Amino acid sequence: MKSLFAALTIVLAASPALAQVPVAANPDQAALLASADSRLAANKRLVYDFWREVFEGGHMELADKYLAEGYIQHNPMVPTGRAAFVEAFGKRVKPVPIEARIKAPLVAIVAEGDLVVLSFARELEDPKDASKKYSSTWFDMFRIENGKLAEHWDPALKR
């Protein structure tokens, strides 16, 4: 066992340093919306349009078109409920023209059953060296119920 560990140590030490492959946005957002299953395609479109119009566009007056009244929020920084969402985000963002595409660096849209996941590329400050950045990802997952967003998850932590 010691010889195996020693051999692995030598191989790894002799290997060139491995570098992270940066996360890249998908340039073809329209292709991400496609699905052979019409229900999954509709769910993807619902989440995509919510993101563009309400989240990025700041048009809280459109929230009832997308969010169920009892919208459940799992992000610890955002309250549960459609009215609470509108109140919280209405204070933070002002409406801007709605873009045809999501502005954030969208990597993928995945739909399965009543769930849709948006994944994004992120560039963050390296905690070991503030002058450097590193590439990572973020995701937002939504559950659709009766044609509206009923629940949301993301990896947010309390700040």
Image: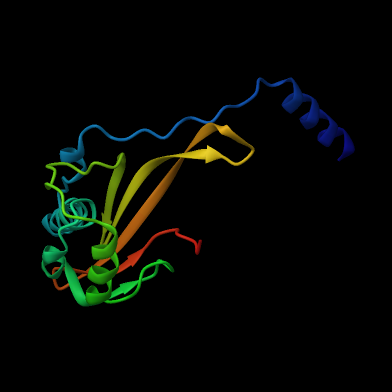
Residue 90 in the image, given as x and y percentages of width and height: 23, 64
Q: Is residue 150 visible?
A: no
Residue 142 in the image, given as x and y percentages of width and height: 29, 63
> 1 and 133: which one is in front?
133
Residue 141 in the image, given as x and y percentages of width and height: 33, 59
Count of labels in the image: 0
What residue is at 21 percent from the left and 42 percent from the top?
A: 32
The residue at the far right in this view is 2
Q: Is residue 12 left or right of residue 108?
A: right
> 152 and 95: which one is in front?
95
What residue is at 14 percent from the left and 60 percent from the top?
A: 39
> 37 and 84: which one is in front?
84
What residue is at 22 percent from the left and 54 percent from the top?
A: 51
Split into 4 quadrants, where in the image is the N terminus? Answer: top right
Tell me which corner region of the image, top left, top right, bottom left or bottom right, holds residue 127. top right
What residue is at 19 percent from the left and 74 percent from the top?
A: 68
Q: Is residue 32 above or below residue 10?
A: below
The residue at the far bottom in this view is 70
